[in-house]
Image: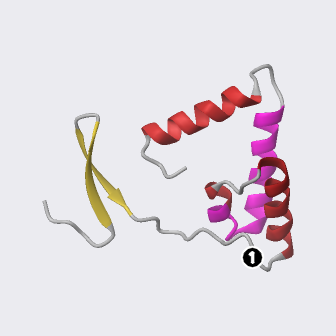
Amino acid sequence: MKQAAGQSFIIHNSQFIIQTMPRLSKLASDHPDPEVRETFDAFLKERGNIPNMFRTVAHRPEIMKTMAAHFRAILNTGTVEKKLKELVAVRVSHLNLCDY
C-alpha cells in the first residue's frame, strides 16, 4: 500500500489502520480573540487544561461557546459521577486512537 503525505500506518487490535494528520490546527491558549480567551481561561481554571477539541473548534468562537456550554451540562449534571464521565471519554478516545 502506498503511503500518502500526512498518513501513517499502524496495527491496532490486529487491524491495519491508516492514520491521517489533523486537517485543522489547534489554537494556542494565548489566542487574541476575547471570546476565545475567555473560554480558554475558564477551562484552565476549571480543569487545569484546555481540551484539544475546544482548541480546534476555537476557529469558530460562536460554535465553541455553545459546545462548551453543552460539555459543561453533560459533565456537571445528572446522576453519573463526573469522574466516570471523564473516564468514559478518555477510554473512547483511546479506542478510537485519538490524541487526548
Magenta-tinted stretch: 55-76
Residue, far left: 1
Q: Secondary structure at mark 1?
A: loop
Q: Amino acid at mark 1?
A: His
Residue, far top: 79
Residue sitting at x 83%, y 48%? 46
Left or right of 75, for residue 86: left
Q: Is residue 87 above or below residue 64?
A: above
Residue 37 % position (x, y): 82, 70
Residue 57 % position (x, y): 66, 62
Instruction: Give the quarter of the image for residue 34.
Output: bottom right
The residue indicated by pointer 1 is 31
- Give the camera-side residue of 11 and 33: 11
Left or right of 18, for residue 93: right
Density class for disc 1 (Cα within 10 Å; few <14, some 14-19, many ≥20) is some
Residue sitting at x 85%, y 56%? 42
Magenta stretch contains residue 57: yes
Quadrant, the N terminus: bottom left
Instruction: Give the quarter of the image for residue 85.
Output: top right
Q: Is residue 36 above or below residue 85?
A: below
Q: How is the image coloured?
A: secondary structure
Q: Is residue 10 above or below residue 89?
A: below
Query: How many labels sit on residues?
Result: 1
Secondary structure character of the magenta stretch overall: helix
Residue sitting at x 76%, y 67%? 61
